[in-house]
Amino acid sequence: MVQFGSGYSMPMDRDFDEHGHSDHNHDHGFAADPDATATKDIGIGMGDLGISMGLGPIPNVHAINAKLRPGSKKVELVFTGFQKGSGQGQTPGQYGFKQRQALVELGKANKVDFTTHSTVGVMGLAGMDRSGNFSRESQDASLQEVKRAIEFAADVAKGGPIVVHTGEFQRSTDPKLSGNFELYAGEQKEQMFTVIDTRTGGVIAKERKNRDVVRPVWLKAEKDKPEKNIKKGDYVDYFDNKVTDLAKRVPKYDLNTGEFETEKMTWNDVESEADRLTQDARRTWKDWKARGADPHDREFNKSFWTRFGKENITDAKEIKVTPEEAWVIQGFQTSMANSVGWAKYQSQNFEETCNTIKQLKDQLVSSKQVYENVKASGDQDALNKLKTSIQSPLDQFGAQPEQKFEHEIIEEKIKQMQRGLEQQQQSASSQMAQAENSAEQIRNIENGDTYAIKEAAKAYAKAGIFAMRQSDRLKEKGQLNKPLAIALENLFPGSYGAHPEELMELVGHSRQTMVQELTKTKQNGGYGYSEEKAKKIAEEHITTTLDTGHLNMWRKHWKTDPNKSIKENDDEYDKWMLTMVEKMAKNKMIGHVHIDDNYGYHDDHLAPGEGNAPIRKMLEIIKKSGYKGEMIVEPGADYYTDNNGFNSVQKTWRHLGIPMGKTGRNWTQVQNYWAGQNAPPYFVFGAYGPSEDWQLWSGVGLD
């Protein structure tokens, strides 16, 4: 393997490739690229840059060995398979003990440091499946892939970062994030949102914000009524009693039309409703806390806000009902009102019917007794007089009326009323059950974004703890090169985690969740660490991977100013990128770096300098922040449009202005330099030279 700056020179070197003057092979010239910045300006040398290798396209240990020869000192091994591997999609499970040991020895022999990239088949750890639902099975499958990549990194690299793709869920751009972005024209008006059933992870609703929702106009007080503790705008019933339970609100009745009023809610109305629901949730939670926060509190469990009692909330200000949740709640409350109304309608004569049936049964006993007595007397005329003619629709056509005994008529009436009563029971109870199901659904809903972030944080925290335990194992053996850390990578703009502020938020939540697990007592399944120690460990084992190419893909979504030139708009975008990199570096959020370029459209993996990403300036910011981690060049296009992938690394050297100086001379070379003593000349003379007697004046021989 080539090692620059270590003895690859000899006295016969002619220096034909110099671009400046040379003094005894100590180069005082300039870099080949006149626009490049000298190494000393950004502090990056050849040894700081590595290369990524996709395992699958690179089939085995021998092929990895061959790829090391061009000169990389850092190599990232990228897994491309998921679960059971294949020839083109390899997984850590396909590398047994001997192969792993061979890679360890390969690294030692070539003085190469390995890093690890978990399978590209993982797109975040929130557990979102292909249908858009969140499932524990999907989450666990992805987490297991990350865990075995951590084990591989422990066995082969003896530490270092393990890159994990983010992409927890698809989302629209959040206007609260920095930058002037729009994924498509009119995005802010047509933003999609999802609401999740926290019991199953299934999607309850997936809607656009520009779709209005219709609901009843709830009756409110039109003025203050101090004697009843009612303020203007409070919910009241038809008898001017204050309504605090949102489930018991009543619709406003229009006397002119004889109808209950309804209204369309725009997204602004939904946001206002979310604020009202938030206040109700906070009040309910405070009352529950004041009563002792009993998890079996009947009043609290009948409310819509039991989910806040299950979360680790210490202050009511932490409680928030989002507009997305409020949008769905309106639909369920309308459904509840409809169900309760039908239930009450079906059961309105229930008690009266029961009393009537009871009276008929008493009458039936008396009627049967009379019938049995007359029948026993044998008087047929008296028995016939007990019969009553039953009217029928056929009577008008001259049909003979049917005659029945009184007790028979009563029995049929009882059966008829019992069937009606059973129908009332079934209808009313099913409607009430449907209403309760709607209420239970409200108790178990959550904005899809916040749900996914919480689930992802839990999974990343588990991976961080797994990395911590593997690091401790290596440390005990004296084999730990550096702590193992999962490095969350910013992916594509359409998914959460791609924006640098989202990435930092996700890492922050994951670290916080890991701290909560580490500070639990051992009796409760934790480690009993102090909060200070837990925070330090979490920061050590959960970090980020900043991918320059993925960050540049936001360029196509930048809303340009038509009054500015193309260059001015590009400069503004570049300024945003550099600001984000600086923010991440300042917050010590960069634990690993991927270097690749593109034109801002797709992840084409051009060599740095061949696209339009300000890579040199980004790396300069990162280096000045004190970053000492790996910088991995990710080849891609050069595999197809140039000779090989390593050309991307060489192009990076050139783009960063890294000079390739000659090696220094040893004393023997200096002592015997130009006298021709031990060093032979580069020309021939004497008997070795051809005869000049028989040749043309041009020097060409006659023969």
Image: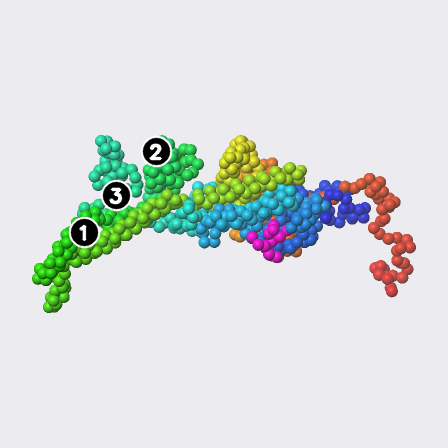
* Disc 2/disc 3 C-alpha distance (Å): 23 Å
Name of the residue lying farthest toward the front = 377
Tell me which label, 1 or 2, sits earlier in the chain: 2
Give the residue type at disc 3: Val
Magenta stretch secondary structure, dominant = loop
472 falls in the magenta region: no
Q: Is residue 388 left or right of residue 601?
A: left
Alpha carbon separation for disc pair 1 and 2: 50 Å
The residue carrying pointer 3 sits among few (fewer than 14), some (14 to 19) or many (20 or more) residues within 10 Å by Cα, namely some
Is residue 292 at all visible to an observer of this figure? Answer: yes
Label pair 3/1, CB-CB below 8 angstroms: no
Q: Amino acid at mark 1?
A: Lys
What residue would you read off at disc 3?
Answer: 250
Image point 80% across, 41% down: which residue? 666
Q: Nearer the viewer, mark 1 or mark 2?
A: 1
3 or 1: mark nearer the eye? 1
Residue 637 screen position, x and y as percent: 60, 54
- Residue 660 can be seen, yes or no: no
Q: Residue, x 41% and y 50% (percent of image)?
A: 203
Residue 403 in picture, x, y percent from top left = 13, 62
Element type where label 2 sits in the image: helix
Q: Which residues are magenta?
A: 83-95
- In the image, what residue occupies the spot 10% across and 62% down? 380
Q: In the depicted view, which residue is nearer to us: 689 or 189?
A: 189
> Do labels 1 and 2 touch, CB within 8 Å?
no
Three-letter amino acid code of the residue under disc 2: Asp
Q: Which residue is mark 1?
A: 361
